[in-house]
Image (cartoon, rainbow, N blue to C red):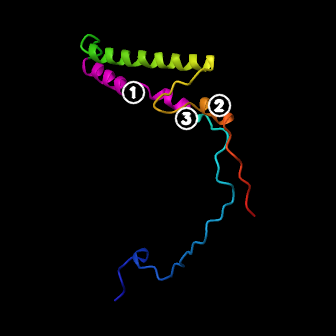
Amino acid sequence: MPSLTPFNLLPMRTKIPLIRYGKYKEMLPLSLKNKVSGRQDSDNQAKVCIQELTLMLSCLKRNDFSQAACATDVDAFNTCYNSHMKTAAKKTEGQVRGTAAVVVGGRLSSANLNKLLVRHPQPMKQKKS
């Protein structure tokens, strides 16, 4: 009687060769570059007060867009937005004056990090032959 098992469910009969890993061969020197890209700085601007905004909009939708019923959520969103605008103003003021950076979330901006890397460049290691 022929087998009713589909062809793709049969066990594979070929052997898979074992891959033997050798020593790590360094193609380029393992060192940091002397500048970083600034792509991640613009992403942080869009993530401000998202939780307060969603709470406020859901409350407004539940209460037929009556601001009197959602006064606490609207106030929470406004205080979050105002505090963000104050920190953004401090950050731009520090960049204009060239003073110490305002560290947001424990991270330096890419421009300030590039300034530090220019002052303290990474030593270039020679490629071993």
- Residue 66 - label: none
Which segment did they paint magenta? 40-63
Element on which disc 2 rests: helix
Q: Looking at the image, which residue is at 52% across and 32% down?
A: 43
- What x and y, as percent, mark residue 89? 52, 16
Query: Quadrant of the rendered structure where residue 73 is?
Result: top left
Element on which disc 1 rests: helix
Mark 2 surroundings within 10 Å by alpha-carbon count, few (fewer than 14), some (14 through 19), many (20 or more): few
- Give the mark toward the camera: 3 or 2: 2
Q: Is residue 87 magenta?
A: no
Q: Is residue 116 above or below residue 124?
A: above
Q: Nearer the viewer, residue 27 or 99?
A: 99
Q: Looking at the image, which residue is at 74% across and 55% down?
A: 126
Amino acid type, mark 3 = Gln
Mark 3 surroundings within 10 Å by alpha-carbon count, few (fewer than 14), some (14 through 19), many (20 or more): few
Query: Quadrant of the rendered structure where residue 58 is?
Result: top left
Amino acid type, mark 1 = Ile
Amino acid type, mark 2 = Lys
The main secondary structure of the magenta stretch is helix
- Residue 115 - label: 2
Q: Would you name the residue on which mark 3 appears?
A: 40
Q: Looking at the image, which residue is at 69% across and 56% down?
A: 28
The first of marks 1 and 2 along the sequence is: 1
- What x and y, as percent, mark residue 91? 54, 20
Distance CA(mark 3)–CA(mark 1): 18 Å
Q: Is residue 118 left or right of residue 81?
A: right
- Residue 50 - label: 1
Distance CA(mark 3)–CA(mark 2): 17 Å
